[in-house]
């Protein structure tokens, strides 16, 4: 009877050991594909979010392109960004809200410049007037 119990225990231990070994081999065999699956799912979700962000940027660029096809928008941007004015208009740029000596100098320089001169002559005159003050 002791031999039977010993034999039964050995079989049970052998079966458990075989089951654990099979489970270990199965885990080793299936682990890399599972890892690749989750890595690829993470990459897919990152690419989907990048795609949606790119679509939003593309839509904004299309809207910007449509705005730039409007001549009135181009005029407003030229006035705003490049400080262009139409012929016969005068443009005043306020640098600082406070009135100071700068405003007096600007008035003197503006009165010293004549409108008939080319732009480069007026530029040189404005620099020399500002430099002398």
Image: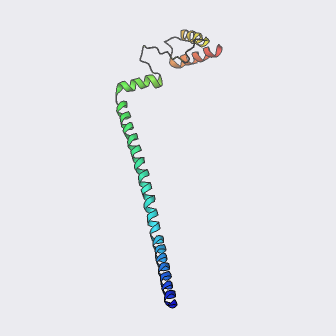
Residue at 60 percent across and 11 percent down: it is 100
In the displayed structure, would residue 117 be above or below residue 30? above
Residue at 34 percent across and 33 percent down: it is 66
Whole-percent x, y for residue 4 in the image: 48, 89
Q: Which is nearer the eye, 18 or 69?
A: 18
Q: Quick check: 102 left or right of 27?
A: right
Q: Which is nearer the eye, 106 or 94?
A: 94
Residue at 61 percent across and 14 percent down: it is 129
Whole-percent x, y for residue 102 in the image: 60, 13
Could you say which quadrant of the image residue 79 lies in? top left
Residue reaching furthest front?
1
Q: Quadrant of the C terminus?
A: top right
Q: Quick check: 11 left or right of 74?
A: right
Q: Which is nearer the eye, 5 or 44?
A: 5
Residue reaching furthest right?
132
Q: How many marks?
A: 0
Could you say which quadrant of the image residue 96 lies in? top right
Whole-percent x, y for residue 52 in the image: 39, 45
Q: Which is nearer the eye, 7 or 14?
A: 7
Whole-percent x, y for residue 124 in the image: 58, 18
């Amino acid at each position: 009877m002791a031999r039977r119990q010993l034999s039964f225990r050995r079989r049970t231990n052998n079966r458990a050991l075989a089951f654990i070994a099979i489970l270990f081999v199965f885990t080793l065999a299936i682990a890399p594909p599972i890892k690749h699956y989750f890595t690829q799912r993470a990459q897919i979700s990152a690419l989907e979010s990048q795609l949606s962000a790119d679509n939003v940027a593309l839509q904004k660029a299309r809207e910007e392109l449509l705005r730039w096809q409007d001549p009135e928008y181009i005029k407003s941007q030229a006035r705003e960004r490049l400080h262009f004015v139409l012929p016969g208009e005068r443009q005043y740029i306020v640098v600082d809200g406070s009135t100071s000596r700068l405003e007096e100098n600007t008035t003197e320089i503006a009165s010293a410049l004549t409108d008939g001169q080319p732009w480069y002559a007026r530029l040189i005159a404005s620099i020399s007037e500002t430099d002398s003050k």
